[in-house]
Image (cartoon, rainbow, N blue to C red):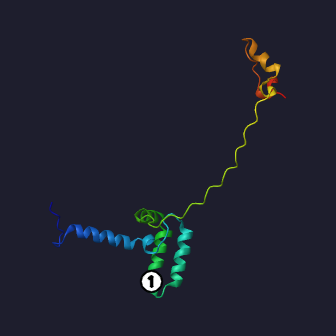
C-alpha cells in the first residue's frame, strides 16, 4: 500500500503525526498539567501559581494566553478538554468500605405477631364494597 505525498513532496503520514504532536503541545491542559474536569476557578488558581513561578515575561505571556483561552472562551475550553489525553497515572486507592454491623438473628414469630384485629377480618369477610373514604378517615387504619 503506497503512502500519500504532500504538496512539498514529503510523506503525508509524517505531516499527520507532526500535526498531532503540535496539537498536543499546544493543548493548555497538557502543557500546564491541568485537569480538564476542573472549572475556571481551579484553572485560574493553577495558572496563577505557574505565572508566579515563571522566569521570563515570554513565559508569563504564554500562561496568560492559555488562561484567557480556558477561562474566557467556554467552547474553546471544552474543545481543549476533549483533546486532552486521559490520566495515565494509577488511580488513587479507594477508601475501604465501612463494615456493616453484624446482622442479628431475627426473633422467632410469636402468636401475637400473626394475630390481626377483628376489624380487619370484618372488611374482608363479605364481598361488600369497601367504603370510599380518604385514608385518614378509614376506621380500619385508625389506632
Q: Quadrant of residue 110?
A: top right
| Crowd band around label 1 with a 10 angstrom C-alpha radius: few (<14), some (14–19), many (20+) | some
Foreground of the two, 60 or 125: 125
Look at 57% across and 60% down and name the residue there: 94
Residue, far right: 143
Numbered disc 1: secondary structure: helix
Foreground of the two, 59 or 128: 128
Q: Is residue 101 above or below residue 140?
A: below
In the displayed structure image, the side of residue 126 where residue 66 appears, left or right: left
Residue, far bottom: 56
Look at 42% across and 63% down and name the residue there: 79
Q: Is residue 75 above or below residue 100?
A: below
- Count the marks: 1
Quarter of the image with the N terminus in it? bottom left
Q: Which residue is mark 1?
A: 59
Q: Is residue 79 above or below residue 52?
A: above
Residue 29 percent coordinates (x, y): 45, 70
Residue 72 percent coordinates (x, y): 50, 69
Residue 85 percent coordinates (x, y): 41, 65
In the displayed structure image, the side of residue 26 where residue 102 appears, left or right: right
Look at 74% across and 16% down and name the residue there: 124
Residue 122 percent coordinates (x, y): 79, 16
Quarter of the image with the C terminus in it? top right
Q: Quadrant of residue 133?
A: top right
Q: Quadrant of residue 120?
A: top right
Q: Is residue 62 above or below residue 111?
A: below
Look at 83% across and 27% down and name the residue there: 142
Amino acid at each position: 500500500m503506497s503512502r500519500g505525498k504532500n504538496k512539498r513532496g514529503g510523506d503525508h503520514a509524517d505531516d499527520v503525526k507532526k500535526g498531532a504532536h503540535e496539537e498536543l503541545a499546544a493543548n493548555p491542559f497538557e502543557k500546564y498539567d491541568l485537569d480538564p474536569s476542573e472549572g475556571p476557578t481551579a484553572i485560574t488558581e493553577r495558572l496563577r501559581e505557574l505565572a508566579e513561578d515563571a522566569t521570563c515575561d515570554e513565559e508569563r505571556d504564554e500562561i496568560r494566553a492559555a488562561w484567557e483561552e480556558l477561562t474566557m472562551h467556554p467552547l474553546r475550553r471544552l474543545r481543549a478538554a476533549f483533546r486532552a489525553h486521559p490520566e495515565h497515572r494509577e488511580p488513587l486507592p479507594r477508601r475501604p468500605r465501612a463494615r456493616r454491623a453484624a446482622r442479628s438473628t431475627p426473633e422467632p414469630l410469636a402468636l401475637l405477631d400473626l394475630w390481626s384485629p377483628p376489624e380487619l377480618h370484618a372488611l374482608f369477610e363479605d364481598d361488600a364494597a369497601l367504603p370510599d373514604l380518604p385514608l385518614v378517615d378509614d376506621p380500619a387504619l385508625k389506632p
